[in-house]
Image (spheres, helix red, strand yellow):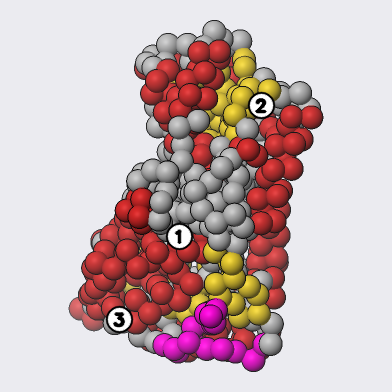
Amino acid sequence: MTTSITHWADGRRLDGASDRWADVTNPATGQVSGRVALADEADAAAVIASTTRAAKAWGETSLAARTQVLFAFRELLNSRKGELAHLITAEHGKVHSDALGEIARGQEVVEFACGISHLLKGGHSDSASSGVDVHSKRSPLGVVGIISPFNFPAMVPMWFFPVAIAAGNAVVLKPSEKDPSAALWLAELWQEAGLPDGVFNVLQGDKVAVDALLESPDVAAISFVGSTPIAQYVYEQASRHGKRVQALGGAKNHMVVLPDADLDLAADAAVNAGYGSAGERCMAISVLVAVDPVADDLVARIAERTRTLLIGDGGTSATEAAGAGGETAREADMGPLVTRAHRDRVAGLIDSGEAAGAKVVVDGREVRARGAEDGFWLGPTLFDHVTPDMEIYREEIFGPVLSVVRVASYDEAVALVNANDYGNGTAIFTNDGGAARRFENDVEVGMIGVNVPIPVPVAYYSFGGWKRSLFGDTHAHGTEGVHFFTRAKVVTTRWINPAARPEGGLELGFPRNV
């Protein structure tokens, strides 16, 4: 039997008026596990209205009361994260340990938001002018919309909603229709933590739901993560309707390996960052830039490691696999891709790379996965001798495909990174501190790792890229996130002392501070 996955508003599940539904599949089996409601305009209006009704009272709730709810949510999330990880694995396909890691990184933002009282402190200047004081404060926006992608159904929403809610806003979350159940689970957890009904709502759906959020006069801001074409659309449409926007787009992350690097460390990092979560990460390493003369040795080490990976159902434990007659009691390293259509697209790009002349060192199309035959399987693929004119280099593949580009020098490596349209994340592997410091300054990318392949910042720093990886001026979480979800007010005050009343009179000139 399939599960009906609905909207959430006013503290309860809401079927909605639309008769449109979409199938949700288990990527490891290919079987339909549920059906998700696809909102129409009336459904979207109802969910947004619920959020709007709740926003004012929540914004006026004391910081002490808001942080108590945040702390309660954090404790519930920490104690029950296994449940959420199971939902993620069942609908996304990533292995259980990877799902737990996603939740842990999202929880860091919840913990950051627990300190919102300090982060919202304003400033005060006594006697800025004669008898005049000035102070600043930050106020919530009201209703904010979050549009999240399929690859991190828990972590990406948690980049935004803990800070938004802690700052006094009410939230509408529009999750991906590919893996929508995590959003409902989070809504129920918020309710258990004591969040008033309507402060966190879920709007399921497709473009109709997205456009409703972008166009609604009641939604003040939009946070988005997804592909670059959609990020640009979201930015343009939401901005046209007067909203503030942070729209995080696609990536083509490069990892530069200098000749002095520890090649075993670099090879481990390339495999982990290239194939983790089947490459369905905006921070995945998809291009390895090998600076002469290390390419032959490095490619051999990566290939050796890649061939040891076990591809299989991430929801099957090692014990279960052994009990079912599996060839090994080891848990899978990598699961399937999220949908059959996406699996076929990535396989087609592998075909394109081979046809263009890139050398297929490890071929993921030949994978023998531990799992159902109808799962959306594609194994790790390693290309060598890739050139920038090839489609596999230009396109964001979003799958387990690692391309090696060979260059002659550090300068050529940096030029390659900077010429790319994307500027999300990059890494350099070296034992030369001077080279690493120079790379930090030279490279035109928002997040940089030095001997760290996936440089996702901790929650008190911002997450976001440059160039076509970000539309808008503000990154996610950190103090930039706090500023995004609040507006500044500056108050200038003069209280009249009757004993020292200033001289009155008319003066139409611009006020001067004295």
Residue located 52% across and 36% down the image: 274
The quarter of the picture where residue 483 lies is bottom left
Q: Which residue is mark 3?
A: 192
Q: Nearer the viewer, mark 1 or mark 3?
A: 1
Left or right of 110? Residue 47 is right
Proximity of marks 2 and 1: CB atoms separated by less than 8 Å: no
Residue located 65% across and 39% down the image: 365
Q: Which residue is mark 2?
A: 360
Quarter of the picture holding the C terminus:
bottom left
Indicate the amino acid at tag 2.
Answer: Val
| Spatial CA span between label 1 and label 3 | 23 Å
| Spatial CA span between label 2 and label 3 | 51 Å
Give the magenta part as a residue range. 1-18
Instruction: Examine the rendered structure and indicate whether residue 315 appears above or below residue 380.
Output: below
Dot 1 or dot 3, earlier in sequence: 1
**Residue 458 place in picture, x, y as percent:** 35, 47
Left or right of 121? Residue 326 is right
Which residue occupies the extreme front position in the image? Answer: 325
Viewer-proximal residue among 174 and 301: 301
Label 1 SS = helix
Q: Nearer the viewer, mark 2 or mark 3?
A: 2
Dot 2 or dot 1, earlier in sequence: 1
Indicate the amino acid at tag 1.
Answer: Thr
Q: Which residue is mark 1?
A: 89
In the rendered image, residue 40 lying in the magenta stretch gets the answer no
Instruction: Examine the rendered structure and indicate whether residue 339 appears above or below residue 161.
Output: above
Residue located 20% across and 78% down the image: 499
Q: Is residue 214 visible?
A: no
Label 2 SS = strand
